[in-house]
Amino acid sequence: TLPTIYAITPTYYRPAQKAELTRLSHLFMLLPHLHWIIVEDSNTTTPLVKNLLQRAGLEKRSTQLNIKTPPEFKLQGKDPNWIKPRGVEQRNLALSWLRSHVDVDRHSIVFFMDDDNSYSTELFAEISKIQRGRVGVWPVGLVGGLMVEKPILNEDGTQVTGFNAAWRPERPFPIDMAAFAISMDLFIRNPQAIFSYEVQRGYQESEILRHLTTRDQLQPLANACRDVLVWHTRTEKTKLTAEVALQKQNKHSDA
Ligand code: UDP
Ligand code: MN
Protein backbone atom coordinates (compact mmCIF):
# COMPACT_ATOMS: atom_id res chain seq x y z
CA THR A 1 0.00 0.00 0.00
CA LEU A 2 1.16 3.48 -0.84
CA PRO A 3 2.01 5.93 1.95
CA THR A 4 -0.38 8.83 2.42
CA ILE A 5 0.99 12.07 1.01
CA TYR A 6 -0.09 15.10 3.03
CA ALA A 7 -0.07 18.06 0.66
CA ILE A 8 0.00 21.42 2.48
CA THR A 9 -1.41 24.34 0.50
CA PRO A 10 -1.46 27.91 1.85
CA THR A 11 -4.00 29.98 -0.05
CA TYR A 12 -5.46 33.49 0.05
CA TYR A 13 -8.33 35.34 -1.55
CA ARG A 14 -7.77 37.06 -4.90
CA PRO A 15 -9.74 36.91 -8.15
CA ALA A 16 -7.83 33.89 -9.50
CA GLN A 17 -8.03 31.84 -6.29
CA LYS A 18 -10.96 29.68 -7.35
CA ALA A 19 -9.35 28.94 -10.71
CA GLU A 20 -6.07 27.89 -9.04
CA LEU A 21 -7.79 25.69 -6.48
CA THR A 22 -10.06 24.11 -9.08
CA ARG A 23 -6.98 22.98 -11.02
CA LEU A 24 -5.48 21.49 -7.88
CA SER A 25 -8.70 19.81 -6.79
CA HIS A 26 -8.96 18.04 -10.14
CA LEU A 27 -5.40 16.79 -9.76
CA PHE A 28 -6.34 15.41 -6.34
CA MET A 29 -9.29 13.56 -7.86
CA LEU A 30 -6.73 11.54 -9.85
CA LEU A 31 -4.62 10.76 -6.79
CA PRO A 32 -6.46 8.74 -4.12
CA HIS A 33 -3.55 8.45 -1.68
CA LEU A 34 -3.29 12.20 -1.20
CA HIS A 35 -4.69 14.10 1.76
CA TRP A 36 -5.07 17.83 1.16
CA ILE A 37 -4.42 20.23 4.02
CA ILE A 38 -5.61 23.54 2.73
CA VAL A 39 -4.82 26.51 4.97
CA GLU A 40 -6.57 29.77 4.21
CA ASP A 41 -4.82 33.04 4.96
CA SER A 42 -7.98 34.51 6.53
CA ASN A 43 -9.83 34.92 9.82
CA THR A 44 -12.30 32.16 9.02
CA THR A 45 -12.52 29.23 6.68
CA THR A 46 -14.60 30.19 3.63
CA PRO A 47 -17.52 28.63 1.75
CA LEU A 48 -15.48 29.03 -1.46
CA VAL A 49 -12.97 26.43 -0.27
CA LYS A 50 -15.55 24.24 1.47
CA ASN A 51 -17.73 24.03 -1.66
CA LEU A 52 -14.74 23.39 -3.85
CA LEU A 53 -13.66 20.42 -1.73
CA GLN A 54 -17.20 19.10 -1.74
CA ARG A 55 -17.62 19.40 -5.49
CA ALA A 56 -14.40 17.48 -6.05
CA GLY A 57 -15.53 14.77 -3.60
CA LEU A 58 -12.56 15.44 -1.33
CA GLU A 59 -14.36 15.98 2.03
CA LYS A 60 -13.04 12.73 3.49
CA ARG A 61 -9.43 13.30 2.52
CA SER A 62 -8.97 16.97 3.13
CA THR A 63 -8.60 19.25 6.11
CA GLN A 64 -9.66 22.88 5.95
CA LEU A 65 -7.76 25.19 8.30
CA ASN A 66 -7.27 28.94 8.53
CA ILE A 67 -4.85 31.42 10.04
CA LYS A 68 -4.37 35.00 8.99
CA THR A 69 -0.89 36.36 8.29
CA PRO A 70 -0.26 39.18 10.81
CA PRO A 71 -0.59 42.59 9.06
CA GLU A 72 3.07 43.50 9.66
CA PHE A 73 4.10 40.49 7.55
CA LYS A 74 1.45 40.85 4.84
CA LEU A 75 2.40 42.17 1.42
CA GLN A 76 0.91 45.56 0.52
CA GLY A 77 -0.60 46.29 -2.90
CA LYS A 78 2.50 47.48 -4.74
CA ASP A 79 5.13 45.56 -2.77
CA PRO A 80 7.31 43.30 -4.86
CA ASN A 81 6.35 39.80 -3.73
CA TRP A 82 9.84 38.88 -2.54
CA ILE A 83 10.13 41.40 0.30
CA LYS A 84 8.20 39.23 2.75
CA PRO A 85 7.92 35.48 3.13
CA ARG A 86 4.56 34.03 2.09
CA GLY A 87 2.70 31.10 3.62
CA VAL A 88 4.80 30.88 6.81
CA GLU A 89 1.93 30.99 9.31
CA GLN A 90 -0.20 28.66 7.20
CA ARG A 91 2.47 25.98 6.69
CA ASN A 92 3.29 26.01 10.41
CA LEU A 93 -0.35 25.55 11.37
CA ALA A 94 -0.57 22.55 9.02
CA LEU A 95 2.60 21.07 10.55
CA SER A 96 1.23 21.41 14.06
CA TRP A 97 -2.05 19.81 12.93
CA LEU A 98 -0.07 16.92 11.42
CA ARG A 99 2.11 16.48 14.51
CA SER A 100 -0.99 15.97 16.63
CA HIS A 101 -3.18 14.02 14.16
CA VAL A 102 -1.12 11.55 12.15
CA ASP A 103 -0.53 7.95 13.13
CA VAL A 104 3.26 7.93 13.52
CA ASP A 105 3.47 4.15 13.15
CA ARG A 106 2.31 4.42 9.55
CA HIS A 107 4.78 5.85 7.03
CA SER A 108 3.49 9.05 5.44
CA ILE A 109 4.99 11.98 3.54
CA VAL A 110 4.64 15.77 3.68
CA PHE A 111 4.75 17.97 0.56
CA PHE A 112 4.45 21.78 0.47
CA MET A 113 2.21 22.42 -2.50
CA ASP A 114 1.67 26.07 -3.43
CA ASP A 115 -1.61 26.80 -5.17
CA ASP A 116 -0.23 28.35 -8.37
CA ASN A 117 2.42 25.85 -9.50
CA SER A 118 1.84 23.21 -12.21
CA TYR A 119 2.14 19.59 -11.09
CA SER A 120 2.26 16.37 -13.11
CA THR A 121 0.44 13.37 -11.61
CA GLU A 122 3.73 11.49 -12.18
CA LEU A 123 5.37 13.61 -9.48
CA PHE A 124 3.24 11.90 -6.85
CA ALA A 125 4.30 8.43 -7.93
CA GLU A 126 7.87 9.63 -7.30
CA ILE A 127 6.98 11.14 -3.90
CA SER A 128 5.49 7.78 -2.88
CA LYS A 129 8.99 6.27 -3.17
CA ILE A 130 10.39 8.40 -0.35
CA GLN A 131 11.72 6.16 2.40
CA ARG A 132 10.97 6.56 6.07
CA GLY A 133 13.44 9.01 7.60
CA ARG A 134 14.37 10.65 4.32
CA VAL A 135 13.74 13.75 2.20
CA GLY A 136 13.17 13.21 -1.52
CA VAL A 137 14.38 15.78 -4.09
CA TRP A 138 13.81 16.38 -7.82
CA PRO A 139 14.11 19.13 -10.46
CA VAL A 140 11.73 22.09 -10.70
CA GLY A 141 11.07 23.89 -13.97
CA LEU A 142 10.95 27.67 -14.50
CA VAL A 143 12.51 28.83 -11.26
CA GLY A 144 15.59 30.65 -10.00
CA GLY A 145 16.24 32.22 -13.38
CA LEU A 146 16.67 28.79 -14.99
CA MET A 147 14.66 26.51 -17.26
CA VAL A 148 15.34 23.75 -14.72
CA GLU A 149 16.80 24.07 -11.25
CA LYS A 150 18.00 20.68 -10.07
CA PRO A 151 20.23 18.61 -7.82
CA ILE A 152 23.49 17.29 -9.27
CA LEU A 153 24.10 13.60 -8.56
CA ASN A 154 27.07 11.25 -8.29
CA GLU A 155 27.87 8.89 -11.16
CA ASP A 156 25.39 6.15 -10.27
CA GLY A 157 22.66 8.69 -9.56
CA THR A 158 22.11 7.71 -5.94
CA GLN A 159 23.53 10.69 -4.05
CA VAL A 160 23.22 14.46 -4.27
CA THR A 161 26.65 16.02 -4.65
CA GLY A 162 25.54 19.58 -5.44
CA PHE A 163 22.97 21.80 -7.10
CA ASN A 164 22.91 23.76 -10.36
CA ALA A 165 21.29 26.81 -8.70
CA ALA A 166 22.29 30.17 -10.17
CA TRP A 167 20.42 32.29 -7.62
CA ARG A 168 22.03 32.35 -4.15
CA PRO A 169 23.88 29.05 -4.70
CA GLU A 170 25.52 29.50 -1.27
CA ARG A 171 22.27 28.54 0.47
CA PRO A 172 22.53 25.27 2.46
CA PHE A 173 19.73 23.84 0.26
CA PRO A 174 19.48 26.04 -2.87
CA ILE A 175 16.15 24.58 -4.04
CA ASP A 176 12.52 25.67 -4.32
CA MET A 177 9.68 24.65 -1.99
CA ALA A 178 8.31 22.45 -4.82
CA ALA A 179 11.60 20.52 -5.10
CA PHE A 180 11.27 18.23 -2.09
CA ALA A 181 8.98 16.19 0.16
CA ILE A 182 9.65 14.86 3.63
CA SER A 183 8.99 11.63 5.51
CA MET A 184 6.54 12.55 8.29
CA ASP A 185 8.57 10.79 11.00
CA LEU A 186 11.29 13.45 10.60
CA PHE A 187 8.82 16.11 11.77
CA ILE A 188 7.93 14.02 14.82
CA ARG A 189 11.60 13.44 15.67
CA ASN A 190 12.47 17.12 15.13
CA PRO A 191 9.77 19.25 16.78
CA GLN A 192 11.90 22.39 16.33
CA ALA A 193 11.49 22.17 12.53
CA ILE A 194 9.15 25.04 11.63
CA PHE A 195 9.12 27.96 9.19
CA SER A 196 10.23 31.40 10.31
CA TYR A 197 9.85 35.05 9.26
CA GLU A 198 13.35 35.70 10.58
CA VAL A 199 15.14 34.36 7.53
CA GLN A 200 16.63 36.07 4.49
CA ARG A 201 14.89 35.99 1.15
CA GLY A 202 15.18 32.51 -0.37
CA TYR A 203 16.17 30.77 2.86
CA GLN A 204 12.75 29.36 3.82
CA GLU A 205 13.54 25.96 2.26
CA SER A 206 16.97 25.81 3.92
CA GLU A 207 15.43 26.85 7.24
CA ILE A 208 13.08 23.87 7.37
CA LEU A 209 15.47 21.34 5.81
CA ARG A 210 18.46 22.07 8.05
CA HIS A 211 16.51 20.63 11.00
CA LEU A 212 15.57 17.46 9.13
CA THR A 213 18.35 16.23 6.89
CA THR A 214 21.80 16.73 5.38
CA ARG A 215 22.73 17.04 1.71
CA ASP A 216 24.20 13.55 1.57
CA GLN A 217 21.03 12.03 3.06
CA LEU A 218 18.73 13.40 0.32
CA GLN A 219 16.93 10.80 -1.81
CA PRO A 220 17.10 11.70 -5.53
CA LEU A 221 13.91 10.94 -7.49
CA ALA A 222 12.39 11.58 -10.93
CA ASN A 223 14.67 9.36 -13.04
CA ALA A 224 17.87 10.40 -11.25
CA CYS A 225 16.74 14.03 -11.36
CA ARG A 226 16.49 14.05 -15.16
CA ASP A 227 12.70 14.49 -15.39
CA VAL A 228 10.81 17.72 -14.77
CA LEU A 229 7.44 16.92 -13.16
CA VAL A 230 6.64 20.27 -11.53
CA TRP A 231 6.93 23.86 -12.73
CA HIS A 232 7.07 27.03 -10.68
CA THR A 233 4.47 28.80 -12.80
CA ARG A 234 3.02 32.06 -11.55
CA THR A 235 -0.32 33.52 -12.44
CA GLU A 236 -0.39 37.07 -13.75
CA LYS A 237 -2.09 39.55 -11.43
CA THR A 238 -5.67 39.79 -12.64
CA LYS A 239 -6.70 43.18 -14.07
CA LEU A 240 -10.34 44.01 -13.42
CA THR A 241 -10.33 47.65 -14.53
CA ALA A 242 -13.50 47.27 -16.59
CA GLU A 243 -15.42 45.97 -13.55
CA VAL A 244 -15.37 49.45 -11.98
CA ALA A 245 -16.84 51.05 -15.08
CA LEU A 246 -19.48 48.34 -15.23
CA GLN A 247 -20.50 48.91 -11.61
CA LYS A 248 -20.80 52.69 -12.17
CA GLN A 249 -22.99 52.06 -15.21
CA ASN A 250 -25.23 49.72 -13.20
CA LYS A 251 -25.57 52.32 -10.45
CA HIS A 252 -26.73 54.92 -12.99
CA SER A 253 -29.27 52.59 -14.53
CA ASP A 254 -30.59 51.68 -11.04
CA ALA A 255 -31.25 55.32 -10.23
N1 UDP B 1 0.00 32.91 0.03
C1 UDP B 1 -0.76 33.16 1.17
N2 UDP B 1 -0.92 34.46 1.59
C2 UDP B 1 -0.37 35.53 0.94
C3 UDP B 1 0.42 35.27 -0.21
C4 UDP B 1 0.59 33.95 -0.64
O1 UDP B 1 -1.30 32.23 1.76
O2 UDP B 1 -0.55 36.68 1.37
C5 UDP B 1 0.16 31.52 -0.46
C6 UDP B 1 -0.10 31.34 -1.97
O3 UDP B 1 -1.47 31.09 -2.22
C7 UDP B 1 0.81 30.17 -2.32
C8 UDP B 1 1.97 30.30 -1.32
O4 UDP B 1 1.50 31.13 -0.25
O5 UDP B 1 0.17 28.91 -2.13
C9 UDP B 1 3.20 30.96 -1.97
O6 UDP B 1 2.84 32.23 -2.48
P1 UDP B 1 3.20 32.68 -3.97
O7 UDP B 1 2.78 31.63 -4.93
O8 UDP B 1 2.66 34.06 -4.18
O9 UDP B 1 4.79 32.75 -3.87
P2 UDP B 1 5.90 32.66 -4.99
O10 UDP B 1 5.43 31.78 -6.09
O11 UDP B 1 6.07 34.06 -5.45
O12 UDP B 1 7.07 32.12 -4.27
MN1 MN C 1 3.79 30.70 -6.53
Image: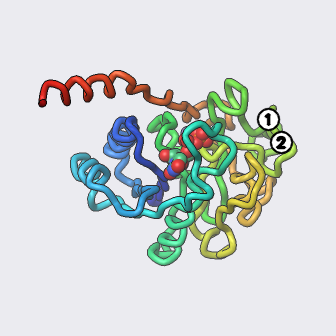
In the picture shown, does residue 56 fall above or below 193?
above
Q: Amino acid at mark 1?
A: Trp
Q: Are marks 1 and 2 in contact (CB under 8 Å)?
A: no
Relative height, residue 129 to residue 14 (above, below): below
Q: In which quadrant of the rendered image does the C terminus lie?
A: top left
**x and y percentages locating residue 16 in the rendered image:** 39, 35
For this view, does 80 lie left or right of residue 128?
right
Q: In what quadrant does ligand 2 lie?
A: top right
Relative to residue 214, is residue 192 drawn left or right? left
Of residue 192 and residue 189, the one placed in the foreground of this image is 192
- Residue under label 1: 167
**Where residue 181 sits in the image (x, y, percent)?**
60, 53
Neighbours of disc 2 within 10 Å: few (<14), some (14-19), many (20+): some
Comparing 22 with 106, the one in front is 22
Colour treatment of the image: rainbow
**How many numbered discs sit on the rendered protein?**
2
> Which mark identifies residue 162?
2
Name the residue nearer the viewer: 75 or 10.
75
Q: Is 105 on the left-hand or right-hand side of 166? A: left
Residue 27 lies in quadrant: top left
* Residue at the image point whose x is 25% and y is 29% from the top: 247
SS of the residue at dot 2? Answer: strand
For the residue pair 114 and 42, the one nearer the viewer reads as 42
CA–CA distance in space, label 1 to label 2: 14 Å
Q: Earlier in the sequence, mark 1 or mark 2?
A: 2
Residue projecting furthest to the front: 255
Q: Amino acid at mark 2?
A: Gly
Q: Position of residue 87 (x, y in %)?
A: 56, 54
